[in-house]
């Protein structure tokens, strides 16, 4: 993968390069990543695959994009409805939190992850908007919506040069804050939970909208059937 043209700027915003990077990351098996943080992802994948009737022994074959489909399936599959909708959403947030930690850890170990983390948030969301079918100035709708949510929920101001790594670093710091007794605990709890909306939007929601034809759990169940 040639990312030299953009990488000298410290960020990547070229749509053609973004296309290559996103495809490369999507096709990367989680097992290829070296960071120990992937073990938490593996545990979640194995549990989901078992519950969905898939062969959990083949979890090493699961790619990054397939892992996202399974994380989304915690809510959309209906398998866990008996636990309640809030439980399902919280478990999906939990899985995405592990994914954030894995990407943060892996960014210095894997060239594809490093490249992905170097993409600007604005360029990435405009790229996804194009895949969704938005054109012209409408391609910035996802970015503007997300920018306002990030400002509201974690108080972080995005700009056109803000990279995915910068965003995830700030999200991680915000979600790792300690509660101070002088702060009403109910308000603290709400702020932390709201921040996960931003994580969901950037890591899964918009990606799913852009590649909705690939979010087919039944195909995965067939691929990994016992």
Image: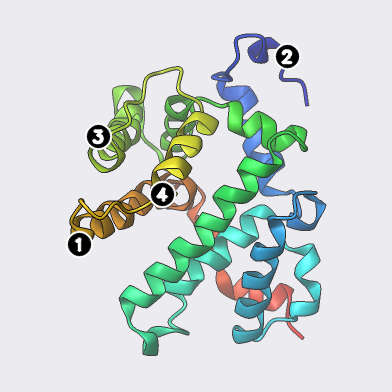
Q: Is residue 123 visible?
A: yes
Mark 2 closeness class: few <14, some 14–19, many ≥20 residues within 10 Å: few
Q: Position of residue 62 (x, y in %)?
A: 73, 63
- Reply above or below: 95 against 128: below
Query: Sequence-wise, which precedes: disc 4 or disc 3?
Result: 3
Task: Using the image, tell me which numbered label, if any, was put on residue 186.
Answer: 1
Task: Using the image, tell me which numbered label, if any, was put on residue 175.
Answer: 4
Query: Sequence-wise, which precedes: disc 4 or disc 1?
Result: 4
Task: Using the image, tell me which numbered label, if any, was put on residue 89.
Answer: none
Q: Is residue 7 left or right of residue 212?
A: right
Q: Is residue 20 visible?
A: no
Question: Real-space Cα distance between discs 1 and 2?
Answer: 47 Å
Q: Is residue 195 left or right of residue 104?
A: left
The residue that label 2 is drawn on is 4
Q: Is residue 210 left or right of residue 140?
A: right
Residue sitting nearer the eye, 105 or 149: 105
Q: What sort of colour scheme is used for the picture?
A: rainbow
Task: Using the image, tell me which numbered label, if any, was put on residue 148.
Answer: 3
Question: Real-space Cα distance between discs 4 and 3?
Answer: 18 Å
Question: Real-space Cα distance between discs 4 and 1?
Answer: 15 Å
Of badges 1 and 2, the one in the foreground is 1
Question: Real-space Cα distance between discs 4 and 2?
Answer: 33 Å
């Amino acid at each position: 993968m040639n990312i030299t043209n953009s990488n000298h700027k410290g960020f990547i915003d070229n749509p053609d390069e973004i296309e290559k990077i996103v495809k490369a990351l999507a096709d990367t098996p989680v097992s290829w990543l070296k960071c120990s943080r992937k073990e938490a992802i593996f545990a979640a994948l194995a549990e989901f695959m078992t519950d969905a009737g898939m062969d959990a022994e083949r979890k090493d074959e699961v790619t990054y994009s397939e892992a996202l489909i399974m994380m989304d399936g915690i809510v959309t599959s209906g398998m866990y409805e008996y636990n309640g909708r809030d439980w399902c959403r919280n478990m999906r947030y939990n899985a995405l939190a592990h994914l954030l930690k894995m990407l943060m850890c892996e960014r210095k170990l894997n060239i594809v992850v490093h490249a992905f983390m170097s993409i600007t948030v604005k360029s990435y969301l405009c790229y996804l908007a194009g895949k969704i079918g938005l054109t012209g100035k409408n391609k910035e709708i996802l970015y503007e919506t997300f920018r306002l949510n990030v400002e509201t929920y974690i108080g972080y101001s995005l700009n056109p040069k803000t990279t995915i790594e910068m965003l995830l670093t700030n999200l991680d710091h915000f979600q790792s804050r300690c509660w101070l007794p002088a702060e009403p605990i109910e308000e603290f709890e709400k702020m932390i939970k709201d921040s996960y909306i931003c994580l969901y939007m950037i890591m899964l929601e918009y990606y799913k909208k852009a590649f909705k034809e690939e979010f087919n759990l039944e195909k995965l169940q067939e691929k990994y059937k016992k």
